[in-house]
Image (cartoon, coloured by chain):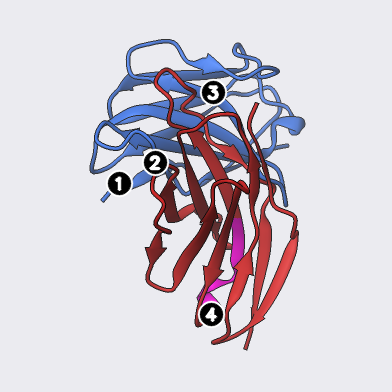
Chain colours: A red, B blue
Amino acid sequence: AQTVTQSQPEMSVQEAETVTLSCTYDTSESDYYLFWYKQPPSRQMILVIRQEAYKQQNATENRFSVNFQKAAKSFSLKISDSQLGDAAMYFCAYRSANQGGSEKLVFGKGTKLTVNP
Amino acid sequence: GAVVSQHPSRVICKSGTSVKIECRSLDFQATTMFWYRQFPKQSLMLMATSNEGSKATYEQGVEKDKFLINHASLTLSTLTVTSAHPEDSSFYICSATTSGRTDTQYFGPGTRLTVL
């Protein structure tokens, strides 16, 4: 079974600075998707970024980028120019891409990000 | 695009009553919908997966007779908590995938259930 580990329960960053959130995963599959979701105090889960494992290029969405290291099974999220609105719980998630594989998302336990003004 | 709504956002009920939560995909047809439960300061726990017109697939340990899921159309799934008890109090979240992109789940805003 796949597992997702977020080793940082809490992180903090100064406004306008850069922060990196860690995520590692364990799988025997070769094709899969990785996601970062954000859950602010409103508790609405928001998709931040999506990575397809077969793509070597790291995904980027404006101030959010990932460092995807497939061999190391690592998928970290970098937030540049942090803003107060980035304060939230961040969840890393895995989904199989194999034909007939599970559609389920496997979530990490989350990292609570605080942004200090 | 890919907006999912839930109704109600909050519900308080007495012990022993049943509560229905609706999950709707507003601007797309949802091939699959998922129901999660989230306890405070914890991650999401998948309860069940449902496809339109077929029975839901429940995760191990989830009582299917207690948490009834109906996915009657491509835009609506409902979760009914039957004979609710205080331990059922939680935050319930649904998500949906589109036929065009089945790999990505889009989440509803959640429903906070409090059972007195």
Residue at mark 2 to residue at mark 4: CA–CA distance: 25 Å
- Considering the numbered disc 4 on the image, is that residue within a helix, a strand or a loop? loop
Confirm or deny contact between disc 4 and disc 3 (CB under 8 A). no
Viewer-proximal residue, B92 or A93?
A93
Residue B83 against residue B29 in the figure, above or below: above
Q: Residues within 10 Å of mark 4 (few under 14, many from 20)?
A: many
> Which of pointers 3 and 2 indicates the residue nearer the eye?
2
Q: Identify the mark at residue B104; answer none if there is no mark.
A: 2
In this view, A85 is above or below B110: below
Q: Residue at x 38, y 48 (%)?
A: A55
Q: Secondary structure at mark 1?
A: loop
Q: CA distance from mark 4 to mark 1?
A: 26 Å
> Residue B86, position in %: x, y?
75, 33
Chain name for mark 1? B
Q: Which residue is at the far front? A: A71
Horizontal side, residue B110 vs residue A74: left or right: left
Asked whether residue B114 appears in the rendered view, the answer is no
Q: Chain of mark 4?
A: A
| Image spot of residue A25 (x, y percent) | 64, 43
Mark 2 and mark 1 residues within 8 Å of each other at the beta carbon:
yes
Q: Is residue B48 magenta?
A: no
Secondary structure beneath label 2: loop
Residue that numbered label 1 is attached to: B2
* Residue denoted by label 3: B48
Q: Are marks 3 and 2 in contact (CB under 8 Å)?
A: no
Label 3 and label 2 in one chain: yes
| Nearer to the camera, A54 or B49 | A54
The chain holding disc 2 is B
Check disc 2 and give the amino acid type: Thr
Kindly report which numbered mark, 4 or 3, lies closer to the viewer in this rendering. Answer: 4
- For the image, the number of numbered tags is 4
Image-quadrant location for residue B92: top right
